[in-house]
Image: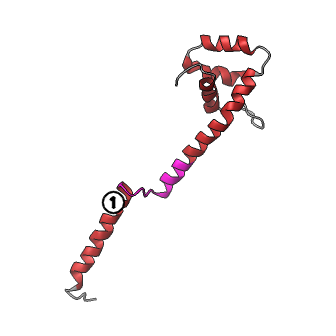
Amino acid sequence: MKIPAELKPAAWGAVGGAVALAIIGFSWGGWVTQSTAERDAKTRADAAIVAALSPICVVKFQQQANATEQLAELKKIGSWQQGDFIAKGGWATMPGSSSPAADVAKACAVALGLNKT
């Protein structure tokens, strides 16, 4: 197929414009691929779940009979072990779940004011 010589610059301009539009869109326009959008959505959903469940963990911790003693014991532990302590205590195991949620346990320790991480 013969392309008229007058259309070649326009065709190259269209190709260059499409490339420039894609670069600008993905760099500054906020465009993302489907996998990036799904990863970001999962991250936000996980954070929302932790934010919703950590207050339940705190209430479960505070409502136990020996909460004061457990809190004193928890304060003796290093901040990196506090989430494990809460998980092992069962306070981060949510109703309907058979195992504790590690992220909820860490958020619970933070919510109890035990560490800044």
Residue 111, quarter of picture: top right
Q: Quadrant of the N terminus?
A: bottom left
Q: Is residue 5 above or below residue 81?
A: below
Please indicate whether residue 56 sits to the left or right of residue 42 in the image.
Answer: right
Q: How many marks?
A: 1
Residue 39: in magenta span: yes
What residue is drawn where x is 29% and y is 70%? 17
State the residue position of label 1: 24
| On screen, residue 114 above or below 13 | above
Q: Is residue 98 magenta?
A: no
The location of residue 97, given as percent across then percent down, is: 75, 36
On the image, the x and y values in percent for residue 71 come to 68, 14
Q: Magenta stretch?
A: 28-41
Label 1 crowd bin: few (<14), some (14–19), many (20+), radius 10 Å: few
Q: Is 9 on the left or on the right of 52, as rendered?
A: left
Q: Answer above or below: position of 25 versus 13.
A: above
Query: In x, y percent, where is residue 3?
Result: 25, 87
- At x 35%, y 63%, the residue is 22
Can residue 94 be seen in the rendering of this structure? yes
Q: Can you name the residue that lies furthest to the left here?
A: 5
Identified by mark 1, the residue type is Ile
Q: Quadrant of residue 54?
A: top right
Q: Residue 91, can we see it? A: no
| Residue 30 shown left or right of residue 20 in the figure | right
What residue is shown at x 46% (from left), y 57% (from top)? Answer: 33
Residue at left offset 61%, top offset 32%: 103
SS for dot 1: helix
**Residue 68 % position (x, y):** 72, 12
Instruction: Tell me which colouring the rendered structure shows.
Output: secondary structure
Most foreground residue, 1 or 62: 62
